[in-house]
Image (spheres, rainbow, N blue to C red):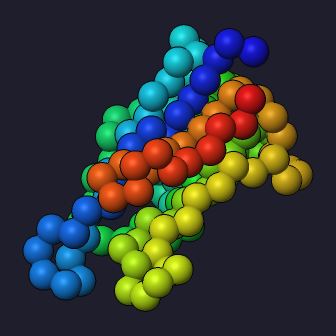
């Protein structure tokens, strides 16, 4: 399948002070259809536009709404993410691609970290 949705810039950069942090989620929809969707705690945070926040992001999900996906990405490829600056070695951000039912493969998807962990990420083709 030639289509591709990428949660491209999971940007984590300290801004002001020890606890201050900023995260930006950027979608790169190469499918030519669908609406990139970012949800956290039942709230739609973005439907394709960059989403930037000056705090950690816990338990957000992203998927390409093709018309076949449920509100929480059911029946579609799901990207789950927590973005938080590490407070100790091994702590911090975590992102994965889920095909665990009720989720299933719908479009090629991936994610990458930038501005601190450049090159880290994964794709599901």
Query: Viewer-proximal residue, 79 or 43?
Result: 79
Query: Viewer-proximal residue, 40 or 27?
Result: 27
Snapshot quadrant of residue 73:
top right
Instruction: Please state, as top left, top right, bottom left or bottom right, where the C terminus lies in the image.
Output: top right
Picture coordinates of residue 116 (x, y %)? 33, 58
Residue 7 visible in the current orientation:
yes
Residue drawn at point x = 44 percent, y = 65 percent: 83
Picture coordinates of residue 4 (x, y %)? 61, 23
Residue 63 visible in the current orientation:
no
Q: Residue furthest bottom?
A: 88
Q: How many marks?
A: 0
Picture coordinates of residue 48 (x, y %)? 42, 33
Residue drawn at point x = 88 percent, y = 52 percent: 101
Horizontal side of 113 relative to 62 (left or right) equals left
Residue drawn at point x = 65 percent, y = 38 percent: 123
Snapshot quadrant of residue 55:
bottom left
Q: Residue furthest right?
A: 101
Residue drawn at point x = 53 percent, y = 18 percent: 30
Horizontal side of 90 relative to 54 (left or right) equals right
Picture coordinates of residue 39 (x, y %)? 52, 53
Instruction: Please state, as top left, top right, bottom left or bottom right, where the N terminus lies in the image.
Output: top right
């Amino acid at each position: 399948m030639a289509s591709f949705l990428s949660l491209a810039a999971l940007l984590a950069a300290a801004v002001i002070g020890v606890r201050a942090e900023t995260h930006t989620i950027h979608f790169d929809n190469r499918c030519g259809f669908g609406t990139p969707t970012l949800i956290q705690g039942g709230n739609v945070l973005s439907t394709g536009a960059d989403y930037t926040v000056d705090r950690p992001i816990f338990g957000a999900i992203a998927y390409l709404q093709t018309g076949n996906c449920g509100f929480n990405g059911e029946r579609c490829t799901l990207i789950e993410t927590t973005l938080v600056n590490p407070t100790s070695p091994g702590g911090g951000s975590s992102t994965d691609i889920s095909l665990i039912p009720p989720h299933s493969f719908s479009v090629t998807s991936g994610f990458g970290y930038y501005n601190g962990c450049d090159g880290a990420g994964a794709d599901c083709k």
